[in-house]
């Protein structure tokens, strides 16, 4: 969080270009500003819960998941929701190149936000997205489940949706390797930089 805050400040001052920071976390749940207490995991599971200033609700991060933090200066008049939609489309494109048809979804009025990316054939959620903007610069980002253990998702209410079925590239394709996934994601998200 401290490193990301530093990167955002540098981008706000034009001391660095738009940045995509790809990494994996040890097991942790992160919660957004709107996450209800009832959605948190049982503390006896031993996985820490970290509060963030991003949008969205509870997300799990762990080994085998590719996390992308986007530090991007938005164009004049461009809002964070517009940018999130652009990122969703670029990630759909990346998954397609990896052999997994995927889609973004529009949120029906009055429903929980359907931000993220879903598999086209099975209807499972494969990418969670939670972002914010501060003085025109984005932070936080997305989490793509590649080949990690999906069990911790079932110990809490993921993304504010009790019935969501979280999935991974490995579950959907039987074959997923982080070294192949990272370049596809990096290339697709670079196009979102150009679109901002």
Image (spheres, rainbow, N blue to C red):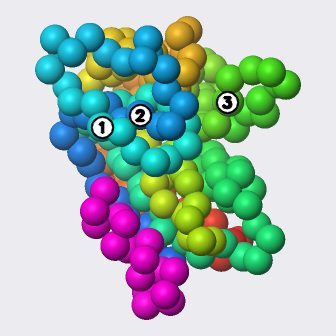
Q: Residues within 10 Å of mark 2 (few under 14, many from 20)?
A: many
In front: label 2 or label 3: 2
SS at circle 2 = strand
Taking the spot 63% from the left edge, 20% from the top edge, the residue there is 123
Q: Which residues are magenta?
A: 1-16
**Residue at screen point 19% across, 40% down:** 26
Q: Earlier in the sequence, mark 2 or mark 3?
A: 2
Tell which residue pokes out farthest to the right in this image. Answer: 109
Mark 2 or mark 1, which is nearer the start of the sequence? Answer: 2
Q: In the displayed structure, does residue 168 sit left or right of residue 27?
A: right
| Label 3 sits on residue | 114
The N terminus appears in which quarter of the rendering? bottom left
Residue 10, given in percent of the width and then of the height, sits at: 41, 82
Pointer 3 local density, CA inside 10 Å: few below 14, some 14–19, many at least 20: some
**Residue 98 coordinates in the image, percent (x, y):** 50, 46
Quarter that holds the C terminus:
bottom right
Q: In the rendered image, is residue 65 in sight? A: yes
Label annotation for residue 60: none
Q: Is residue 186 left or right of residue 34?
A: left
Crowding at dot 1, Cα within 10 Å, few <14 / some 14-19 / many 20+, comes out as few
Q: Which residue is mark 2?
A: 31
Specify the label residue 50 is tagged with. Answer: 1
Mark 3: which secondary structure?
loop
Residue 71 within the segment the image draws in magenta = no
* Residue 101 point in image, percent of width and height: 63, 36
Q: Is residue 147 left or right of residue 20?
A: left
- Given residues 121 and 192, the one toward you in this image is 192
């Amino acid at each position: 969080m401290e490193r990301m805050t530093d990167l955002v400040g540098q981008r706000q001052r034009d001391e660095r270009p738009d940045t995509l920071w790809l990494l994996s976390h040890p097991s942790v749940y992160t919660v957004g500003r709107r996450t209800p207490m009832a959605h948190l995991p049982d503390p006896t599971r031993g996985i820490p819960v970290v509060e963030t200033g991003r949008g969205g609700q509870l997300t799990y991060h762990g080994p085998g998941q590719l996390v992308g933090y986007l530090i991007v200066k938005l164009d004049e008049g461009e809002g964070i929701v517009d940018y999130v939609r652009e990122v969703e489309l670029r990630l759909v494109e990346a998954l397609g190149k990896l052999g997994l048809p995927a889609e973004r979804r529009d949120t029906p009025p009055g429903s929980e936000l359907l931000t993220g990316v879903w598999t086209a054939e099975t209807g499972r959620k494969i990418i969670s997205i939670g972002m914010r903007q501060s003085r025109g610069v984005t932070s936080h980002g997305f989490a793509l489940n590649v080949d990690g253990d999906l069990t911790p998702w079932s110990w809490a209410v993921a993304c504010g949706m009790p019935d969501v079925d979280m999935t991974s590239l490995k579950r959907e394709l039987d074959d997923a390797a982080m070294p192949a996934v990272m370049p596809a994601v990096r290339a697709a998200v670079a196009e979102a930089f150009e679109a901002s």
